[in-house]
Image: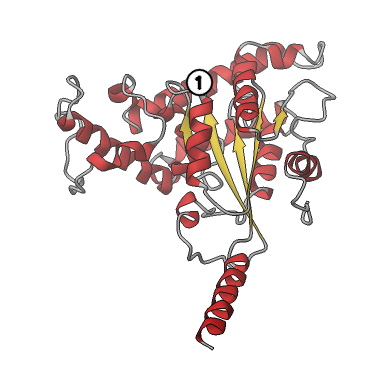
């Protein structure tokens, strides 16, 4: 009798486990020339692909304005002039050195961050990472003055118009690949068996892996209105470690029974890393008339790539 009860209990637990592990799709995004356009504006390759239909110089000017804004914000508000030579693959990598000190009256200009790269200086870097994470959560409307915000909004609108709604349509697609418009699910939820969304049949999360350095990449997320859809702990810089290593970290973090990964980008490095991980890869092509661009890329297309690599999972929601 006792043995029978044990078997029944075990079966119940397995059933419950299946119910609380809905499918999780992790979208691993590249940034430049994928979610945003910047390098192709600066180098005029975006405009030139339109064979005279785009004002090349206007595109270059827009790119320079973005470049100046990004660098100014990095230096003035995100410590980039102090930590440019201390690039890390993600913000939380330094958290073990953070002692939780109250930083409200801490003078970052006088703590003499620099070599040697010992525990004392690692703590100083961890402090900066903590403040950067807080500012990312707060958004620029709590940092910039009204005039700068207006100039930023105007620049976004002009660039979006010039690129035929690339920025806004990429953001809309990113939103479609999220469970919610704000406070998207982070990896923390999946490291825990108890989540607030256990009744959902299908969960999604966006992760960014960029070849650029970390701080400018975080600033780009904010400036291009992606910060509400990609949490700061889901932003990776492959600058020093390579995209394959970042992908491996992501796989470890999203250790979920029913997880699927899909990489979306324009470069060879993310393509090669996706092949190594055996994840589907969608190559973005900004040239006019190409299907894998913004606007143009659809959930149905992404669902097809998922189904090719994960044939045992039915794409009931794509």
SS category of the residue bearing label 1: helix
Q: Position of residue 189 (x, y in %)?
A: 48, 57
Quarter of the picture containing the N terminus is bottom right
What residue is rendered at 49% in x and 23% in y?
242
Residue most extreme to the bottom: 1
Q: Position of residue 118 (x, y in %)?
A: 17, 27
- In the image, 297 versus 76, the foreground residue is 297
Residue visible at 17% across and 35% down?
107
Q: Residue at x 65, y 24 (%)?
A: 271
Is 64 above or below relative to 140?
A: above
Q: Position of residue 161 (x, y in %)?
A: 71, 31
Toward which corner of the image does residue 275 lie, by quadrant? Answer: top right
Q: Residues within 10 Å of mark 1 (few under 14, many from 20)?
A: some
- The residue labelled by disc 1 is 67
Q: Nearer the viewer, residue 90 or 261?
A: 261
Left or right: 165 in relation to 126 = right
Horizontal placement of 93 versus 166: left or right? left
């Amino acid at each position: 009798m006792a043995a029978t009860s044990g078997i029944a209990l075990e079966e119940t637990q397995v059933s419950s486990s299946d119910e609380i592990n809905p499918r999780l799709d992790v979208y691993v995004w590249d940034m430049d020339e994928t979610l945003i356009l910047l390098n192709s504006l600066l180098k005029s390759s975006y405009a030139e692909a339109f064979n005279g239909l785009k004002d090349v110089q206007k595109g270059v000017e827009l790119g320079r304005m973005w470049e100046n804004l990004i660098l100014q914000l990095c230096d003035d508000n995100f410590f980039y002039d102090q930590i440019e030579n201390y690039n890390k693959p993600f913000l939380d990598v330094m958290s073990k050195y953070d002692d939780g000190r109250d930083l409200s009256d801490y003078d970052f200009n006088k703590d003499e961050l620099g070599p040697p790269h010992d525990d004392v200086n690692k703590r100083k870097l961890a402090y900066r990472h903590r403040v950067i994470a807080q500012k990312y959560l707060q958004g620029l409307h709590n940092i910039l003055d009204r005039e700068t915000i207006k100039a930023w909004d105007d620049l976004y609108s002009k660039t979006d118009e010039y690129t035929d709604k690339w920025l806004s349509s990429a953001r809309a697609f990113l939103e479609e690949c999220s469970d919610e418009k704000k406070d998207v699910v982070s990896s923390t939820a999946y490291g825990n068996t108890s989540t607030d969304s256990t009744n959902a049949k299908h969960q999604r999360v966006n992760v960014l892996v960029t070849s650029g350095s970390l701080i400018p990449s975080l600033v780009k997320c904010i400036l291009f209105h992606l910060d509400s859809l990609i949490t700061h702990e889901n932003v990776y810089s492959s600058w020093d470690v390579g995209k394959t290593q970042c992908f491996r970290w992501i796989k470890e973090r999203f250790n979920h029974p029913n997880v699927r990964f899909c990489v979306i980008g324009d470069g060879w490095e993310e393509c090669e890393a996706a092949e190594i991980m055996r994840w589907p890869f969608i190559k973005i092509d900004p040239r006019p008339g190409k299907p894998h661009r913004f606007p143009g890329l659809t959930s149905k297309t992404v669902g097809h790539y998922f189904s090719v690599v994960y044939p045992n999972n039915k794409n009931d929601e794509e």
